[in-house]
Amino acid sequence: MPRYLAVVGTRNWSAFAPLSQITRRLDAVHAIHPDLVIVSGAGGDVGLCAARWARANGVRCIEYLPEFERYGRAGGPRRNSFIVARCDAMLAFWNGGRGTQDSVTKAQAASKRVTAVRPDGTSKRVG
C-alpha cells in the first residue's frame, strides 16, 4: 500500500530557505518508502517544488487546487481539508504562516503524523 505524504508550506519558502531543503527531505522519505505518493496544494514554492521533485523521480503526485475563483477565501482551507483527508502523514515547511497552520492543525486533529521543518533546517514532530 502506498504511503501518502502531504507536502505543504509557506508560499514563499525560498525567501527564507533554499528549496534544496525540500528535495533533500523528499529524497530521504522516498528512500524509506519507495511507494511514496505526494499530496500537494499545487502552489507556492513548497507545492511546486514537491510536484517537480515527484515528476523528476517518477513519483505519483496528487494536487488539490484551492479554486479561489469558485470558493473565494474559503478555497485555501477547503483545499487543506482535502489534503489532510488524503494523506497518511504531513511534512510542513513552515515559518509560522496561517495557511500552513491551518493544514497542520487539521492534520493534528485527524491524528496524522506531522513533521514541521523550519527555515533553519531543524525539524520537530508536532503531531
Image (spheres, grey):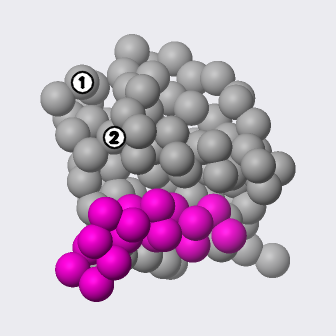
Q: CA distance from mark 1 to mark 2?
A: 9 Å
Amino acid bearing label 1: Phe
Q: Is residue 83 magenta?
A: yes
Give x and y (percent) for residue 23. 39, 45
Q: Is residue 21 magenta?
A: no
Which amino acid, mark 2? Thr
Asked if residue 51 is positioned above or below residue 13 in the image, the reply reads below
Horizontal side, residue 126 vs residue 67: left or right: right
- Whether 104 is drawn above or below 94: the answer is below
For numbered disc 1, what is the local secondary structure? Answer: loop
Q: Give x and y (percent) for residue 119.
A: 37, 22
The residue located at (65%, 72%) in the rendering is 86
Mark 1 and mark 2 residues within 8 Å of each other at the beta carbon = yes
Residue denoted by label 1:
16
x 21%, y 80%: residue: 69
Circle 2 SS class: loop
Quarter of the image where the C terminus is located: top right
Q: Which residue is disc 2 drawn over?
A: 10
Q: In the rendered image, which quarter is residue 81 located in?
A: bottom right
Q: Which residue is drawn at the image coordinates 20% and 35% (left, top)?
A: 14
Q: Quadrant of the N terminus?
A: bottom right
The span picked out in magenta is 68-85
